[in-house]
Amino acid sequence: MHVLHVIDSVDRAGGAEQALAVTATHLIRRGIRLDVAYLLDMDGFQPELAEAGVALFGVHRTSRAGSAAGLRQVIRDRRPDLVHTTLFEADVAGRAAAMACRVPVVSSLVNSAYGPEQFASPALRPWKLRAAQGLDAATARGVRRFHALTDHVADVMARRLAVRRSRIDVVPRGRDPELLAAARKRRDAVRGELGLAADTPVLLAAARQEYQKGLDVLIEAFGTVRMAVPEAVLLLAGAPGTQTERLREAAEAVGGEEHVRFLGERSDVPELMGAADVFVLSSRWEGLGSVVIEAMGCGTPLVSTDLPPVREIVGSEERALLVPPEDAAALAAALTAALTDRMAANARASAALSHFQDTFTVDRVCDRMVDFYERARAGNRT
């Protein structure tokens, strides 16, 4: 089967982009001929994708109409069996191009978009969000099948895009268990590179510095954690964003650079997880939370906001501590417990690792994606 995957970019910072890079080799091994067209002119996973055997096409235009025109040309030249779109701009342009060329199109639903959490974001204008939802829903009518990362995303987006739930298949993201196991073995080396002693209590968050990720709540909670664990260090790995200035100001109030370290965008997040005592997800909303899967696969104790997709991934509170979103006091209590009761934290991490191995390895996920492609190519829209 020949699949053209259309995505906004192949930037290393994005979860969807990372998932594409991780799965490409495994899909090709399963007989998928894979092309990737990306809309933004950014360096990223191009070398890894090319090495895996992917044919890459940069479709860099200044408008959605221009992107759709460029994609139509790629589709005519490559003649794929399916077009697979991921992320908003790729969805809009890719769906339009595929329908114009009469090629079946499938789309990934990677987030629970257009909800009250997004409308509360100070960086988003409500009218623009409504317009985006309308455009998304209009182009969604031509999609043969949808792929959602979780049942929660499938249920929510079926309503918000006005599509039948039966047209959405759920396949989570997967990770390479061997790479994550290797990351755990580099704990001492990574701590040495970061200038951290072997016994320093370390919390890690890996997220863009945006409102969605709740890092402001995490830093507030960390101030309380330090009252119980004064030597604790919080590592923040992720690209700067609209909240960066505010976050740096908040960090100064809870220990400054000595205790809150902004690591910037990193390509070694699994190794950082292996070096941390606790991984924390503080998001206000998520579509999946791929970093939760990575933390589980690394065997790192996990504390997370109790979001429906995260609860769906974790499956049981015996595998992680879950707290309400935007509740700094509850988050502080959970982080303190994870740092001070290591036996219980490690027991949860061990249970989470077993669940990862049963459910979220890249091989299991890619088998399910091939089934999804076959079902879509066969013309099933119900």
Image: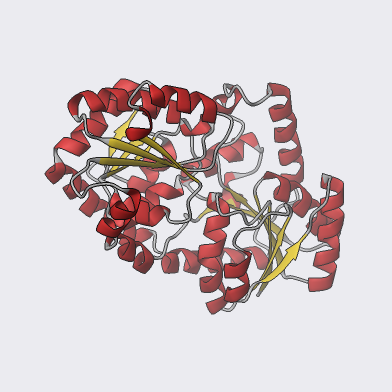
Q: Residue at x 50, y 24 (%)?
A: 246
- Using the rendered image of the protein, determine whether residue 325 is visible from the camera's viewpoint: no
Which quarter of the picture shows residue 240?
Answer: top right
Q: Position of residue 281 (x, y in %)?
A: 39, 38
Left or right side of 137 for 228: left
User: Which colour style is shown?
Assistant: secondary structure
Q: Is residue 102 above or below residue 61?
A: below
Residue 312 image position (x, y, % from top left): 38, 44
**Quadrant of the snapshot with the N terminus:** bottom right
How many tags in the picture? 0
Above or below residue 84? Residue 123 is above
User: Which of the 4 image quarters holds residue 303?
Assistant: top left
Q: Position of residue 139 (x, y in %)?
A: 76, 45
The quadrant the C terminus occupies is bottom right
Residue at horizontal 72%, vertical 34%? Answer: 132
Q: Closer to the camera, 301 or 172?
A: 301
Name the residue: 62% across, 76% down.
Answer: 53
Give the x, y percent position of residue 88. 68, 44
Taking the image as shown, residue 285 lies to the left or right of residue 179, namely: right
Q: Say whether residue 345 is left or right of residue 295.
A: left
Can residue 365 be seen in the rendering of this structure? Answer: yes
- Can you say whether 128 is above or below 25 in the image? above
Q: Nearer the viewer, residue 126 or 281?
A: 281
Q: Is residue 244 above or below residue 65?
A: above
Which residue shows up at 38% across the image and 55% down it?
270
